[in-house]
Amino acid sequence: MFERADDSPDDGRNLLRQLVQESTKTWQNGAAFRWAIAANDDMEITLQLQSLPFSAATIKAKPALQKDNIAVQVQAAWLMTTDQFAPSTGLFGPIPVLFASEVDGVRPLLEENRDQIFRSLNSLSKR
């Protein structure tokens, strides 16, 4: 549930009406929304609804506004729970969930190549 600036609940109609108004070609102003997974300094993971006070045309015309590290306005955030690596392992962040059709065959490969897998996961997380 979204809230208005005065902390009263938004029943959904105001946000939807604003989105429709912002999407019309004759309207000069606009807003762009996106979903993002973010982490804070306490290693908490949140799902965020982010926005920029620009029209879609403006954002599409300026690649810098499409980057992940652009300053945004967080409209709403929900705390997500996930298993995290212990700091003693040398890995940081959420533990990825790996899917395999043959778990019994994959498990020994993961255990035998643990150091290489940890290095690979850390290099992926630095991107």
Image: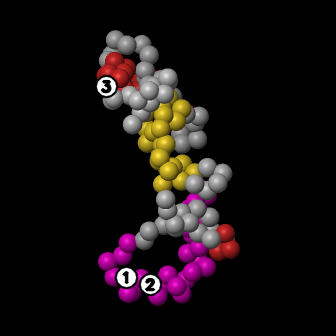
Q: Observer-nearest residue: 3 or 77?
A: 3
Q: Residues within 10 Å of mark 2 (few under 14, many from 20)?
A: few
The N terminus: image quadrant: top left
Q: Compute the Cα span from label 2 to label 3.
A: 50 Å
Foreground: disc 2 or disc 3: 3
Q: Amino acid at mark 2?
A: Arg
Secondary-structure class at tag 1: helix
Q: Which x, y percent locates residue 52?
A: 50, 29
Foreground: disc 3 or disc 1: 3
92 vs 25, left or right, is right
Q: Which residue is mark 3?
A: 13
Q: How is the image coloured?
A: secondary structure
Q: Which mark is residue 103?
A: 1
Q: State the residue at coordinates (61%, 49%).
A: 40
Q: State the residue at coordinates (32%, 21%).
A: 17
Compared to residue 21, the image places residue 108 above or below, namely: below
Secondary-structure class at tag 3: helix
Q: Which x, y percent locates residue 106?
A: 42, 82
Within the magenta stretch, is there residue 14?
no
Residue 61 visible from this viewpoint: no
96 vs 1, left or right, is right
Q: Amino acid at mark 1?
A: Val
